[in-house]
Image: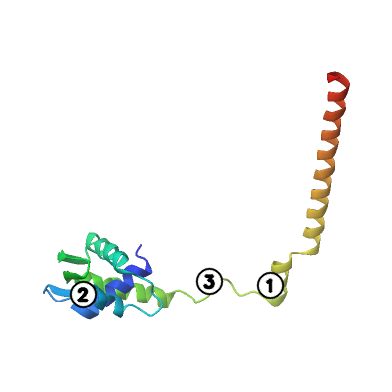
Amino acid sequence: MQDNGHRMVAAALIALAGTDDVYKVVEADEILERLPAGTSMDKQALSAVIRDLRGMGYLDVKYFTPDEYCLLVSPRAAELTAREEERAKEEPADPRPIMSAAAVKRERTGSGSSRISVFFAALSGSLIGGVIVAVIAILLQKFAL
């Protein structure tokens, strides 16, 4: 339900403001610095994520400006990050089933009989289409002219 951006912002807010029952003023630049290095989020996207988290009940925002937020982080936000971490641990790294080398080669190249059958299907389709067009052209020439 929550994407990676929501989880990363929630983790950064927990690190900065904690989950105690006290409103804290946090600057947007501080939050953006806490996000992982590969994240490309600006202040507008951060504001949208914080509004989403507030709507989901993970934050309570007293006031906000484009550069700072006065907010209270709910203990539910910690459950969100913990649940996402557990889900990531449970999922295997590669969800594809393990296949033998011969099966991988067949999957990549296709079997020889399927290639031949596709060739003959395409050939017969083009021949039938050509015959239909020729019949229509002959009928038009005979009756229309």
Tag 3 residue: 95
- 136 or 55, which lies in front? 136
* Mark 1 surroundings: few (<14), some (14-19) or many (≥20) residues within 10 A: few
N-term-proximal mark, 1 vs 3: 3
Number of the front mark, 1 or 2: 2
Which residue is rendered at x = 79% and y = 49% of the image?
A: 122
* Mark 2 surroundings: few (<14), some (14-19) or many (≥20) residues within 10 A: some
Under circle 1, the secondary element is helix
Tag 1 residue: 104
- 98 or 9, which lies in front? 9
3D distance between C-alphas at marks 3 and 2: 39 Å
N-term-proximal mark, 1 vs 2: 2
Tag 2 residue: 27
3D distance between C-alphas at marks 1 and 2: 51 Å
Q: Quadrant of the C terminus?
A: top right
Question: Decide: marks 1, 2 in contact (CB < 8 A)?
Answer: no
Residue 142, percent from left and from top: 88, 21
